[in-house]
Structure formats: structure tokens, C-alpha cells
Amino acid sequence: MTRYAKSIRNWVLGVIFLVLTAIGIAIPVLPQVPFFVVALAFILPESRFLRKKYVDWKRRHPRFFKAIEDWRRARRLAHVERRFARHETRLRRERLFAEALSHGAAEAALRARVMDAGSGPPSGAGAAAAAPPAPPPPAAPAAAPAKPVGARV
């Protein structure tokens, strides 16, 4: 969407919300303030005159806007802290995964010791890989030599 189209869209939506504000003033059931704030949010970036009035009002009431700027700064810092915490969690997970991979041989030996101790097969993923191979089946008993037919014992 081009800048011109966005400007037109913002003006149209701003006027629609201003009309809803006027209807809200006439009909007490409909709220006026939220519609007015949304209309300002759409029109303010597009109107040089209103933007100038907003900046002047902001200069005349520094205490009010200082509170808003403090709130914005706190939100921005909280956002950065959350991003940092997510990054730390991901790094911790990757470090634990790398340690698990590097200790893979030690874990397999530990599993083999557990199997030798007779505590049963390990459970969970990789249990089949950690189990020792099954012993070979016992050899079949040797067959007696066949007797010729008709021979006497």
C-alpha cells in the first residue's frame, strides 16, 4: 500500500470515528471518548495542523507527558528484558543439549552398569539402544547316530 493510500485510509477512518463520537454525544448509550481517541490516532499523523497543536499542548503540560514517557520507557525496558530472558533460556537449553551430547558415552556406560546390577531395563527414549545384546540361544543336543534298518541291538 502506498503512502498516499495509507493517508487516505487514515483520513477516512478518522472521519468515521469522529462521526461515531458525535453520535455518541447525541445517544448516551454509545461511548464517546474511545471513538474520539481512535479518531485522533488516525488523523494526528496525517494532519500537520493537529500535530502542531498536539506538540504545543505537550509542551504546556510537561507533567502529564512526563508520566506517559516514563510509562513508555518502562514498557520498552520490560520488552528488552523479556527478549533477553528468552535469549538466555535458549542459550541455557542449547548448552544443556551440548553437554548431553558430549556425555553420551558416559551415559551409555552408566546404563550398562544399571543393567548389570539387575535393576531392570532402563525406561525412556534410547532404552533399546542401551540394552546389552541377548545371549545366543543354547545349542541343540547332539543327535545319536542313526541305526541301520533291520540291525539288531
Image (cartoon, rainbow, N blue to C red):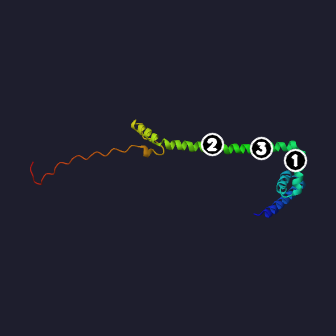
Q: Secondary structure at mark 2?
A: helix
Instruction: Tell me the crowding category of disc 3: few under 14, some 14 to 19, or many 20 or more residues within 10 angstroms, Cα based.
Output: few
147 lies left or right of 115: left
**Location of mark 3 (residue):** 73
Q: Residue reaching furthest top?
A: 117
**Location of mark 2 (residue):** 88
Residue 109 x/y as whole percent: 43, 39
Q: Quadrant where the N terminus lies?
A: bottom right
**Residue drawn at point x = 52 percent, y = 41 percent:** 99
Q: Quadrant of residue 63?
A: top right
Q: Quadrant of residue 68?
A: top right
**Location of mark 1 (residue):** 58
Instruction: Tell me the crowding category of disc 2: few under 14, some 14 to 19, or many 20 or more residues within 10 angstroms, Cα based.
Output: few
Residue 71 x/y as whole percent: 79, 43
**Residue drawn at point x = 72 percent, y = 43 percent:** 78
Going from the N terminus, do you reach mark 2 or mark 3 first?
3
Going from the N terminus, do you reach mark 1 or mark 2 first?
1
Kindly tell me whether residue 22 is visible in this rendering.
Answer: no
**Which residue type does callout 3 highlight?**
Arg
Kindly tell me whether residue 65 is visible in this rendering.
Answer: yes
The span from disc 1 to disc 3 (Cα, nearest Å) is: 17 Å
